[in-house]
Image (spheres, rainbow, N blue to C red):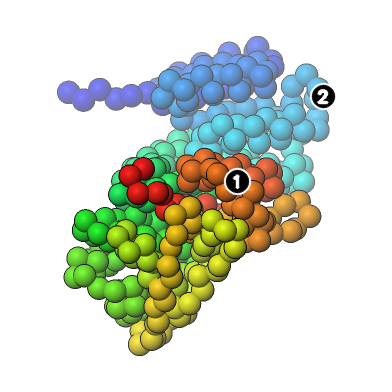
């Protein structure tokens, strides 16, 4: 015999008789309930349940509490706070003072449905059953996305690593559960190390799936011992045959010769990495060709630059350089270069942290784009 888990509904109202009536009604429907009499109590219960991994299935809440009895503003504020805590929690609002404006704003803030007071029992139970089903689907999707993120994280290199006399640090921070950004640092043999970064157009699961496809194609062609030019040409040919018409990828791929201190690269329409010279100069690595996924027979070129001890290479996606402040100004690659030059004695892990903190302080709002960076530094022999 299989045990059936009772749905859990949190009921929020400042009138005790309403709470008792709703609790009795839902108990008769096989629904477990908990009660709250204020917005603060609601937030505390939702946060506590979430921390224990015992999320509520639905929140049934009044729109008015101590502040006033008719405007619904307290309920709107509570709704926004609830969605910040648990985006997947379905919310049903109850009020005797509903208006079209209130309903529209509540829906915009994530409300699932409205029930008018005094309520009709059959109507209320029908709405709750619908929202229980909605919540179940949302949580299943959320769990799948959490698993997808964990898989993606395993495709990304460790935050820091040292290969021979080269030091690397990586940042991969999705704006959502999963990312369309890709980066990798791979020892090809005892002498050569590949380094790459890419950005798939779009966001969410479609971009993440295309990112995984890119990673698989790159790995398969790396095993064939191709040069950057050959690899990018082959990757573009394959991606162009499989990608949707409105999708594309910016991509940068290079190979470090750890013996001769040379770096050979091909840039396929990606943000130009910054080569910060120990002497203080800055070089933008732009050469290569256009974006991937548009022209299957596109020709690419490769360029080789010499590396000196103390030189650092900054690779990044547009979530770094195109972060926008309140005035609509972009962070920009020049600001990125300035930070790199200002902290010339910082190792890659420390420099990456400084850059990320600077971008976050500049942006000062919820992230809208994925942020990915790789910092490489040439170390003296024996370090």
In the rendered image of this protein, does residue 126 appear above or below residue 265? Answer: above
Where residue 68 is drawn, which disc sits there?
A: 2
Kindly indicate whether the residue at mark 2 contacts the one at mark 1 (C-beta within 8 angstroms). Answer: no
Q: Is residue 229 left or right of residue 1?
A: right
Decide: few, some or many residues near mark 2? Use Cα within 10 Å; few <14, some 14-19, many ≥20.
Answer: few
Q: Nearer the viewer, residue 163 or 210?
A: 163
Task: Name the element at disc 1.
Answer: loop
The quarter of the image holding the C terminus is top left
Q: Is residue 326 left or right of residue 367?
A: right
| Residue at the image position 55 percent from the left and 29 percent from the top | 59
Q: Nearer the viewer, mark 1 or mark 2?
A: 1
Q: Is residue 148 left or right of residue 45?
A: left
The quarter of the image holding the N terminus is top left
Give the alpha-carbon distance from disc 1 to disc 2, as whole Å: 54 Å
Q: Position of residue 206 (x, y in %)?
A: 41, 61
Q: Nearer the viewer, residue 144 or 25?
A: 144
């Amino acid at each position: 015999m299989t045990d059936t888990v009772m749905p859990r509904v949190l009921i929020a109202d400042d009138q005790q008789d309403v709470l008792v009536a709703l609790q009795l009604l839902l108990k008769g429907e096989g629904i477990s309930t908990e009660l709250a009499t204020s917005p603060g109590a609601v937030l505390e219960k939702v946060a506590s349940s979430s921390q224990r991994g015992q999320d509520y299935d639905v929140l049934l809440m009044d729109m008015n509490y101590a502040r006033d009895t008719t405007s619904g503003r307290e309920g709107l504020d509570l709704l926004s706070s609830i969605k910040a805590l648990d985006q997947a929690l379905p919310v049903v609002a109850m009020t005797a003072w509903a208006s079209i404006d209130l309903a529209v704003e509540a829906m915009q803030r994530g409300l699932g449905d409205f029930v008018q007071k005094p309520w009709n029992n059959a109507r209320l139970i029908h709405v709750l059953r619908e929202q229980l089903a909605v919540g179940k689907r949302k949580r299943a999707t959320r769990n799948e996305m959490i698993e997808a993120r964990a898989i993606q994280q395993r495709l990304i290199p460790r935050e820091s690593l040292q290969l021979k006399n080269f030091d690397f640090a990586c940042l991969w921070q999705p704006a959502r559960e999963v990312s369309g950004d890709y980066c990798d640092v791979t020892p090809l043999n005892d002498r050569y190390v590949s380094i790459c970064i890419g950005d798939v157009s779009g966001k969410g699961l479609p971009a993440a799936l295309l990112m995984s496809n890119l990673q698989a194609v790159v790995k398969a062609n790396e095993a064939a011992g191709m040069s950057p030019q050959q690899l990018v040409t082959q990757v573009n040919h394959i991606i162009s045959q499989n990608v949707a018409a409105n999708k594309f990828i910016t991509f940068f791929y290079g190979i470090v010769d750890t013996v001769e201190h040379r770096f050979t690269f091909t840039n396929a329409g990606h943000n130009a990495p910054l080569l910060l010279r120990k002497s203080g100069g800055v070089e933008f690595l732009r050469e290569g060709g256009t974006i991937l996924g548009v022209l299957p027979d596109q020709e690419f070129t490769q360029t080789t630059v010499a590396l000196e001890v103390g030189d650092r290479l900054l690779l990044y996606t547009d979530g770094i350089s195109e972060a926008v402040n309140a005035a609509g100004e972009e962070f920009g690659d020049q600001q990125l270069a300035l930070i790199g030059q200002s902290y010339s004695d910082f190792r890659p892990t420390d420099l990456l942290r400084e850059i990320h903190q600077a971008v976050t302080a500049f942006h000062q709002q919820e992230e809208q784009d994925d942020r990915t960076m790789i910092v490489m530094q040439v170390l003296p022999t024996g370090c």
